[in-house]
Image (cartoon, rainbow, N blue to C red):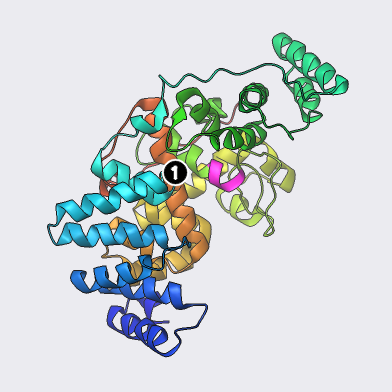
Amino acid sequence: MFEDHGQAEKAFDYFSRVVERYPESKYLEHSIWKVGWWLYRLGRYTEAIKWFDTYLSQGRYTQFQTPVLYWKARCHERLDDRRNFLASLNTLMEYFPWSYYGTVARIQEIGDLGPMFRKDLEFAPRSRSVRLDFRERRDLARAERLLALGFFEEAEQELRRIGLDETDPQFLYYLAILANRCGMYHRSIQIAERVGSFFSGRLPFDLATILYPRAYQNLFAGTSKEPLDEFWLLSLIRQESMFRTEAVSSAKARGLMQLLLSTARGVAGNRAIGESDLHQPATNVELGIRYLQRLLERFGSLPYALGAYNAGEAAMASWIKHFGSYPVAEFIEAIPYKETRGYVKLITRNYLYYSYLYKNKAFRSLEEVYRPTAPEAPAARTGG
């Protein structure tokens, strides 16, 4: 298809015809968004804004509302219309604060994620709930005692018996803290997401560190070099497996970094690697970093490497051929595969959160996030 090959004029013509000829089509909203996007790529910013406004005038939320708002803002930026540029960014920050686009809007306008993660927002965990039955109270007490003694696996088993049909956010917060301490990162994130739904555009700082945990930290010793630092790895693992060592995808990718057995063997050298090895955190992370390093060495840029990690090297080579001259935000937007496009966006968003939460690091643009550096990635430690 034309847009898969970066043929902007032909893609614009194609989607324009869809809008004109099929006004009742289920693809209408997608096509309106695409007309605006390709007009942006053609440098026809005033026309693009009109199409984006046509989309927004429908007055209902769809999956394309956030990219429409973001690229409308970028059109205004190109036209030196700062008032409307900021208006679109503010809409994203107000109504879609935790989206990729809302987060990028915030770093572009403010350069600081501090207002999203508040240390001064008081929200204390509550250790008991009136909704617990006798058995759940007993299991919770056992889990607390086992945690205090350092028996994390045993405490995990007790916590798994406690139902999550709770509505008290402070008690859920307490359960999330306990699950995090046990190393049940997937469960703690799920519970913390429910707690987060009680808030709007800001979260208590400590709750945010449960949503974005610094898990398996011992495996990342020595991974502080750029561009592949600890926080990129955590961001990728959170997206790939939500920190579940036992995770297996429909394609049989396994473990924390969701490695295919063939991929793992391809970077393992002479080591014999079986499926069970990929569920060992140290082995999985070590081989995952090796594979990412190989992708960085081939493609020379982290967004390219992340996209190739998800979609494969052949697909990325083709996209670089057609879109390689695009600025980084536009390249990510142009990725033809919906899954890969969303994957790179969410890992980028995760990285922004991790960088702020654990290093108080701020960025002002995606170009700064993905600034060019030598494509060198360190190996992970093989010990636990």
Q: Residue at x 30, y 67 (%)?
A: 53
Residue 27 sits above or below residue 216 on the image = below
Residue 246 percent coordinates (x, y)? 71, 41
Q: Nearer the viewer, residue 327 or 295?
A: 327
Residue 110 percent coordinates (x, y)? 25, 38
Q: Residues within 10 Å of mark 1 (few under 14, many from 20)?
A: some
| Residue 331 visible, this angle | yes
Left/right placement of residue 348 relative to residue 111 reads right
Residue 22 sits above or below residue 146 on the image = below
For the record, the magenta segment spans: 237-241
Asked if the magenta segment contains residue 238, the reply would be yes
Residue 232 sits above or below residue 356 on the image = below
Left/right placement of residue 379 relative to residue 176 reads left
Left/right placement of residue 236 relative to residue 358 reads right
Residue 344 percent coordinates (x, y)? 44, 53
Q: Residue at x 36, y 34 (%)?
A: 225
| Residue for badge 1 | 98
Q: Magenta-highlighted stretch: main secondary structure?
A: helix
Asked if the magenta segment contains residue 172, the reply would be no
Q: Residue at x 14, y 62 (%)?
A: 79
The three-letter code of the residue at mark 1 reads Trp
- Secondary structure state at the residue bearing disc 1: loop
Residue 232 sits above or below residue 122 on the image = below
Residue 93 quadrant: top left
Residue extending furthest toward the bottom: 21
Q: Nearer the viewer, residue 201 or 268?
A: 201
From the image, which quarter does the N terminus lie in?
A: bottom left
From the image, which quarter does the C terminus lie in?
A: top right
| Residue 384 visible, this angle | no
Residue 33 quadrant: bottom left
Residue 308 percent coordinates (x, y)? 47, 59
